[in-house]
Image: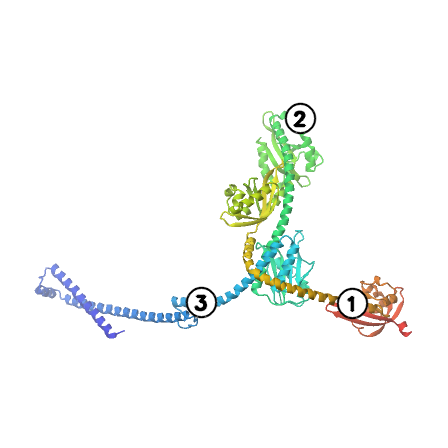
Amino acid sequence: MNPTKDNDIIIKFTINGIALGVLIRLLFIINSLIVNDYEFSLFGLFQFYRENPENWLFDFIILASGALIGYLLGRAYIDKKNELENSLLAEKERTKKVYLFTEHLRKGEYAGEGILDTKDELSKSLINLRDELKLKEEEENKRKKEEADRHWITEGLALFGAILRETSNDLNQLSYKVVSEMAKYMNAQVVGIFIINDENPENQFIEQTGAFAYGREKFTDKKIEFGEGLVGACVLEKKTIFLTEVTDKYIEITSGFGKSNPKSVLIVPLIANETDVFGAVEIASIRVFEDFEREFVERTAESIASTISSLKINMRTAKLLKESQEAREKMERQEREMTKSMEQLKHTQLLAAKQSEQFISFTNSVNHTMIRAEYSIDGTLLYANTKFLDKFGYKSNKEVEGKPIFMFIHEKDREWFEDLWKRLQSGGHHYEGDMKHVSKQGTDVWTMATYVSVRDKNGNPEKILFLGIDTTEAKKQSLDYEGQINALNRSAIKTEYSPGGKVIDFNKKFQQAMKYSDQELADHTIFDFIDPAEVNEFNIIWKNIIAGVPFEGRLKMLSKEGDEKWFHGTFSTVLDMYGEIAKTIYIGYEITGQIKIEQKNKEQTKILKQQEEKLQLSQVELTKKLREAREEMRMQFREIETVKLLNEKTLEGMLDAVVTINQDNIIKFFNKAAEDLWSINRKQVINRHVSELLPERHSELGDNYLGNFFKYGDDTMLNTRTEVFIVDKFGDKIGVLLTLSEAQIGKRYSLTAFIQKIEVELF
């Protein structure tokens, strides 16, 4: 700012204000002279001021006002100018700081704290940019490690994808390959797989189908209830369990793998389609698993669950198709029989409607084959034939005559039946169709029923005739089949095709997968869904299907949008009553996700071939070492067995009686001297409870009875020579010298009694 220059500007604005005031005043004076007819001269001006002296005051006010306004405008201009100059200086300083901060970022220096003012948006953006660049550098380091982890996961998924494809038809082989390869790839000491046994839906349980511990397969028959232990909880809650603090008794109590104590345990549920659980995989190791290893196990578990799901679905589908085919054939036979009966019934109805006078003769023939009853117009039962009584559970007409018709109609059907009855009362059109009645015992009686109004000579309704054929069993089977078909439609893809391949019927699952509307699917054939490059190959398959050869396996189709859709299912033909092909049914399940995983794994297979060759070379060496180790272990086992036999023979040859029991007080050793002492054969006591040799009732003969001390947990007589007595099988009391010795290895325990007859020692 320059004060002198500012004052000059204010003076200029003041002078201009005065000049403007003078100009305005002159214009006003000139106007007044003209209006008031004054002479337009100095004399006229003088005369105007003399007659109007107040004009001097006006002149002063106008000049003063012009000067004041000019001064104020000048001051406002100077203030605004100074404000703009200060703003420009501040902006210049901020630009300089931004430049310095940007230079730091360009050089990769992320400090720069305090350089920028965080109040403006540009500074905030630059600071955010610095933080993002710093974060990206850190993330780049993480990315390299994550890339290595992902590569490890990809290799593992490819390996297990191949294993699952090779063993997808045998659950036991699948279980063994999964646990053995998982133990090797995860470098884990213990791996187990548990699968839900749902053969009996009312009694499902979790079954251990494979276990691998310390480099060898374990054969187990372990059953777990839902919610029992960690495995049961994992399956019930469908959540992964990861333990890094494992108790010393975990393996023995929870897993049953042995006595080794792992540092971490990972239990992952086998879940397919995000909701369906099929079991769990349990992995224990002497090290703590990393996050990417847990991710690998969880992703592998999805593939395992998908394979198990497909395996079980194939088994159930085959069974269901067979049952469905048998049921359909049975229903077709029943339909033919019912059609024949219905033709007879329709013929009978026409005769009844046209000629009521012939009804009596017709009734006699109907009573032998059909259920028949007559009701008054108000619904009272007038007559019921023998078949009516038999089917509805009554013994005589006395039980039903005079009863209302609604006695034989279920409560839930009465509302619509009332409308039907009103129509019949007025002589309306007869009713013909399936109807459910209620027997005396409350059971359902299904009939192919006809209700018709019988008119008198004047054409007025006189009574209501009921004729029916019992279809209870066929209806129950039909409802059961409908339920099975509905269940199949909810869980699987189902389509029906004509022999020429045209789409006849389809369920929602197929429509959703292929993304077609109802009308679009109705205009398509199965060949429209096949990849054009594979149509010739599929034509051969279709000809075999039409020839009666079922097809089961994978099938690729193209959706409306051109997306590949993979299914695993079965084509089966349905024959009509003449044994000719009526249609072809396809039942399957979408496996697109599984196929995509397999395709991705195949891409990784090429990369893994070189590593597989190296692994095969090392595997040969490892196999050789394992063979040598096994041979060495066999030698050790033989030596241990030899030592055991020598010890037993030594004890057997002793003159003292020797008896050994375990921690359950079961007799495990009984030598010849003991047989002579008790006068009993060892076969009668070996693997029996010691109380059978030393009954508690003999304790009444004295406190130093051997049975009081010779039992698990009693150490009062250990390693001492004590005089006690026993009772032989003849009831004779025999004094003996007793020495007790115990031994324990891990959880195995033994207590041995060395017994010498006192008479022999004194002799």
Secondary structure state at the residue bearing disc 2: helix
Q: Residue at x 14, y 63 (%)?
A: 29
Q: Residue at x 38, y 66 (%)?
A: 122
- Vertical relation: 467 (above or below) 167: above
Marks 2/1: CA–CA distance: 100 Å
Q: Earlier in the sequence, mark 2 or mark 1?
A: 2
Q: Earlier in the sequence, mark 3 or mark 1?
A: 3
Q: Which residue is mark 3?
A: 133
Q: For this rendering, which residue is in front, 160 or 447?
A: 160
Report the amino acid beneath label 3. Answer: Leu
Marks 2/3: CA–CA distance: 103 Å
Q: Nearer the viewer, mark 2 or mark 1?
A: 1
For the question of whether residue 49 can be seen, the reply is yes
Image quadrant where one finds the N terminus? bottom left
Q: Nearer the viewer, mark 2 or mark 3?
A: 3
Marks 3/1: CA–CA distance: 74 Å
Percent x, y of residue 718: 80, 73
Secondary structure state at the residue bearing disc 3: helix
Tag 3–tag 1 contact (CB < 8 Å): no
- Vertical relation: 443 (above or below) 674: above
Q: Mark 2, residues whose alpha carbon is within 10 Å: few (<14), some, or many (≥20)?
A: few
For the question of whether residue 266 can be seen, the reply is no
Q: Residue furthest right?
A: 763
Q: Which residue is mark 2?
A: 361
Q: For this rendering, which residue is in front, 587 or 467?
A: 587
The reply, left or right, for residue 128 in relation to residue 491 is left
Secondary structure state at the residue bearing disc 1: helix
Q: Which residue is mark 1?
A: 642
Q: Earlier in the sequence, mark 2 or mark 3?
A: 3
Q: Nearer the viewer, mark 3 or mark 1?
A: 1
Percent x, y of residue 763: 91, 74
